[in-house]
Amino acid sequence: MQTANAARASLILAIETSCDETAAAVIEDGRRIRSNVVASQIELHRAYGGVFPELASRQHVFDIVPVIQRSLDEAGATWDDLTALAVTRGPGLAGSLLVGVNAAKALAWARGLPLVAVNHLEGHLYSNWLDRGGRIDPAALTRPSLPDLDAEGRAFPLLVLIVSGGHTELILMHGHGRYERLGATLDDAAGEAFDKVARLLGLAYPGGPAVQAAAEGGDPAAFDFPRGLTNAAIHPEHRFNFSFSGLKTAVLRQVRELGPAAPPIADLAASFQAAVVDVLVKKTADAARAYNVARVCVCGGVAANKALRAAVLHRLPVPASIPPFFLCTDNAAMIGAVAHYRLLTDGPTPLDFDVEPDLSLDAGS
Amino acid sequence: MQTEPWTIITNSAADTRALAARLGRELAAARPEAGAVLALSGDLGAGKTTFVQGLACGLGIAAAITSPTFILVNRYRLPDGRRLHHADCYRLKDAPLEMWDIGLDDLLTGEDIVVIEWADRIPGLLPPDHLEVAFGYVDDARRSLTFAPHGAAWAASLARLQAAVAAGLAEMLDAPCH
């Protein structure tokens, strides 16, 4: 697809408020990050003379305008430079989504700019298209951003593993905006399993970084934790679905069995992490073969886990792409990337759209 | 009428699901217009989400019930048009304030079914009428469930659930919810 060349230069201001983070970004031509502001990373509260509960949806109301202004300032852009706006419509928490959607609608109407409503999950997926300067970063186990076509001239189908605190899904991407959901978690998301096991092991929240740190130096084979739904003979209908609830309970059982005296935290964390990574990589590899995909993309918060990154880049049968760490967690840059491609295929979204807390990523979404 | 707490030991996750499904069918059939609030407490792995999976199946929800821990509230549509809201206070620092802030108090007074995990963290938010369910880990397979009804409607529902269990958990297991 001759995206960037065929269209006039696009400069999109994107807004994301689906869960905890208030975020805004300015994206040029769907790929270049001119700015990427996340409220939790900056001190905005001082201006309002108070501290507000971190998670509350009300927080978005306080943060949204300064975050948008900051994203324009950091991009060195003005309202007149923008060609479109973008906002996350779902999935997420209704009250949080409403703040971003209403702000975006008001700005679109006041400024006469086209607005694109974006699926948050699609955003994670498009974080793989955002520019990383064309470099391979061995320390971050990151390859360059996805080109529109690979070396054989084939861009699709792509296989996407979305893996975060709220989602664990395998998506087959037939083209820009064309998705087929192959499977998803039946209970806990992978990121949530990290959080809950961190708690069982007495580690900090959020659990992803804590378990990863605790696992360093641990023996990943010390405990044989279950790999849920990986026996295709028993669970043929769940070939591409996930289950992490049983793994969580198995770790709990093991901790109880070992008793209170100094449990081997490093071995437990490493064995748990190995079980999660094995399941994710095995199912992704199976799907990559079954659908003969050109490439695999891994995205979402758990894609920041180093053991998963190493496994994805070395144990898959096809080339794989993982965004840099700062694009794995929720951000608005990825929403701007989606909007660029969506404008080219579908045009802007009429302003009477509503938030969709239950939105999924399926054909036609 | 059952007004005292009632404890039952389930022998498997399938048992827990079947018991919860029976309660879900009770809510769908006997209390079609009214909202209902279930307040779940118990440690990780004690069976709370398993219970909600059964409850949802009994309410006629076909969708997979996944954990709401990250997003705080998941919602599902019932065949009768109401919704099931599945909330989770697990990761909140100031659960009463934050749950109030996302509008949980509005849900609690509506006509929908609301089931809350780690509800012991929001005692002040719960309405006078609700069902407390406390989960305990007995061994690998078995869990203890202690039901405490608050309000006449829940006392009646719990009495019917107890009668159904007395007639045999095995019979409930024939239901397609395990």
Image: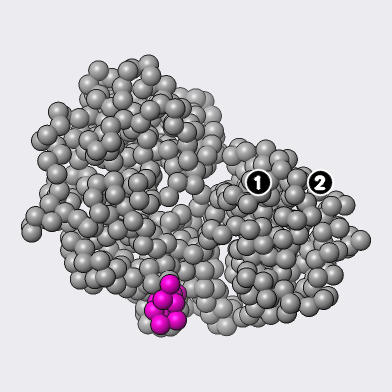
Q: Are marks 2 and 1 on the same chain?
A: yes
What's the residue type where badge 1 is placed? Arg
Magenta residues, start to end? A227-237
Question: Which one is nearer the viewer's eye here, A155 or A133?
Answer: A155
Residue A186 in view of the camera: yes
Vertical placement of A320 versus B170: above or below?
A: above
Percent x, y of residue B43: 64, 66
Provide the chain ID for the residue under circle 2.
B
Q: Choose the circle earlier in sequence order: 2 or 1.
A: 1
What secondary structure is the stretch in magenta mostly built from?
loop
Residue A37 sits in which quadrant?
A: top left
As measured in the structure, the alpha-carbon distance from the residue carrying label 2 to the one carrying label 1 is 21 Å
- Mark number, residue B128: 2
Question: Which one is nearer the viewer's eye here, B34 or A163?
Answer: B34
Percent x, y of residue B175: 67, 71
Indicate yes or no whether the magenta region holds residue A234: yes
Mark 1 Cα-neighbour bin, 10 Å: few <14, some 14–19, many ≥20 = some
| Image quadrant occupied by the N terminus of chain A | top left
Q: Which colour style is shown?
A: one colour
